[in-house]
Amino acid sequence: MKKLIILLIFALLSFSVYVSAQDIGSKDIEVKLVKVKGAITANEVGEFDIIVTNNMLKDIDFFIAKNFYSEKWRATADPYLLSVESGFTKTTRLNIAPVKFLIPGNYKIVVNIESRDKSYVKEIPLDVEVIPFGEDNIETELIVNNEIDPRLGSPARVSLENLYNFDIDDVELSFKSDLFSFDRDFDLKANEKRVETFQLDFGDDVELGDYNFNVVVKVGNSVLGTATEKVILAPFSEITEKIFRSNKFNKKIIISKENTGTKESIEEVKLELSSIERFVARFNVNPDSIEKVDGKYIAVWGFSLEPKDRKDIVVTLPYGTYLLILFVIALLIYIIFYITRTKVVLVKKIIDVTKDKEGIRGVKIILHLKNKGNKSIEKIRIIDYMPRLIAASGKDFGSMKPTRVQKTIDGRMRLVWDFDGLRRGEERIVSYLARSNLSIIGRLLLPEAVVEFQVGKKIYHNRSNKLTLLTRPSKKERMS
């Protein structure tokens, strides 16, 4: 009897718990789903707000999207643990993002909301729409010439860019027209850029005209990218260009263009010339324009070439002729200069120094005059100056005494020698002794002398060198 009573009590308790759980799920907890961003590209994140109202008489903690697992999606809640006090409402933001490549379309996802004590569990269905990035989910570009010579064929390239942040397996590329058909399969890594190259060759009997070249990129039955180009199969213009450059003294440049195709061609020839070449260049056909670009001159010719037509542009650079003319002119100038030049040179030198214990007391100076010109010169004058505190008397001059000895306003002595003339190659030497009553200590500066001469009605002045003398006593004098 006692055991029966215990079993009855246990059954009543279990039934009470079961009833309590059912009551919570249906009455006392309200869950509302608000779609914030339900349409996304495969690289974006969907957003939903989950609003929980606790009508119980106790606080409850709820786990949002706990133990969520999907091969295609990732679900995260912020906050992940939602603590809702009795009588309150709280909201958590649920983010839904793809974890792999997904074809655009509508997807259903289920997440759970569960209380900490597991007395409340509810499945929340979500509707997420994956929309395309634009016209293409795999950006597709067909790169091909708009006009193709069917005898030569042409390469074509299909540039692909995976706009997904995920790898795409089993991609099918179809490149077709009425003239050919290509199919290729490959995988694309996340955000990968890829170029597929095709060589287009056509038979001799192909019909000329306009054709649409179409590219379709798909996975299964879903088209992820397309591209179309209109291409013309037509006769072509084939231009053969030859450039000949001679290395002779008179340089010549020949640019030849020939249209060996079957269609008229508009051609342009550009030739770069230096400043000198621009000046000396001679053309068989004058250029349409010559422009200066970055210090160079660009000569431009424009013309049309009919089939089997040829155009020759000849540029002659007569360096030899101009150099010969310049050489002759330079030679004539030299001959005239050599014949008519007048050059008188005056050199100033110190040949002896007189010292005492304190310093320098006198210096002997020579002025060397020479006519290095090609003709005689008349009326020549030498003018020299002595610094202050230095002078010369009549006995201090050599065989050629000065015409005048003058004292300047600033206290210097001015010496003047006059000569009637100086034949070609003739030399004259003037010497004198400059003395000082005081010993010169430090540095002695002797100014330049001047030779003055007349050629025709024009008077010329040439200057000699300057002299600097350090007035340092000898070692023996310093010891004494």
Image: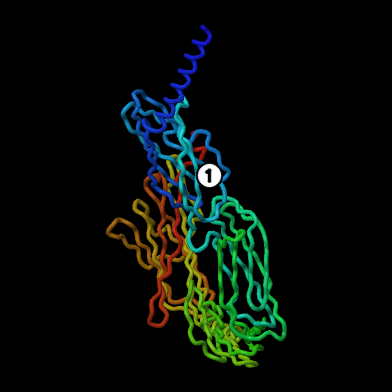
The answer to whether one can see residue 348 in this image is: yes
Give the quadrant of residue 420.
Answer: bottom left
Residue at 51% x, 75% y: name it: 296
Residue at the limit of the structure toward the top, as seen here = 2
The x and y percentages for residue 193 are 59, 58
Q: Nearer the viewer, residue 468 or 63?
A: 63
The x and y percentages for residue 250 are 63, 85
Give the quadrant of residue 85.
Answer: top left
Rendered position, 289 above or below 346: below
The image's colouring method is rainbow
User: Position of 360 compared to 427: left or right?
Assistant: left
Q: Which residue lies under the disc numbered 1?
A: 73
User: Position of 270 compared to 79: left or right?
Assistant: right
Residue at 46% x, 22% y: name it: 15
Q: Nearer the viewer, residue 394 or 100?
A: 100
Q: What residue type is disc 1 on?
A: Trp
Residue at 42% x, 65% y: name it: 401
Which SS class for mark 1?
strand
